[in-house]
Image (tube, rainbow, N blue to C red):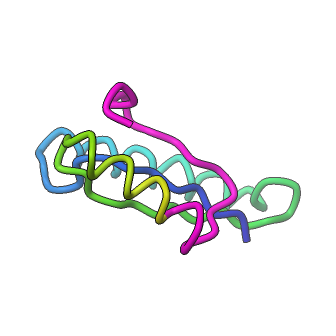
Amino acid sequence: RLEVGSRTRVHSSTAAISTAGYDARIKAYNDAGGLDGQKIEGVYKDDAFAPDKAKSNAVDLIQNDKVHVLSTFGGGQVA
């Protein structure tokens, strides 16, 4: 399994649209066999668009959740 971690503002209206789109794309990849045969899973952390929370979420995704890839939904400037 390939985990893609993202820190975003999970509880906002725009984030709901972004995560739904992201999840749809991940589902499309998984339905087609995954990426090189590995299923993809999205892991989301809410940063409330606050730089200190974005940083701690990024560290948590890498060190504790052990995600393989770290991504963002356009709020990367706070990370």
Image quarter (top left, top right, bottom left or bottom right) of the C terminus: top left
Image quarter (top left, top right, bottom left or bottom right) of the N terminus: bottom right
Of 42 and 67, which appears nearest the observer? 67
Apparent side of residue 14 relative to residue 6 in the rendered image (left or right): left
Of 72 and 16, which appears nearest the observer? 72
Q: Residue at x 57, y 54 (%)?
A: 26
| Rendered position, 36 above or below 21 | below
Residue 71 lies within the magenta run: yes
Q: Residue at x 55, y 74 (%)?
A: 64
Q: Quadrant of residue 30?
A: bottom right
Q: Quadrant of residue 21?
A: top left
| Rendered position, 75 above or below 55 | above
Of 62 and 67, which appears nearest the observer? 62
Q: Residue 43: x percent and y percent?
A: 47, 64
Apparent side of residue 53 relative to residue 64 in the rendered image (left or right): left
| Segment tinted magenta in the rendering | 61-79
Q: Residue at x 62, y 63 (%)?
A: 67
Q: Residue 31: x percent and y percent?
A: 66, 61
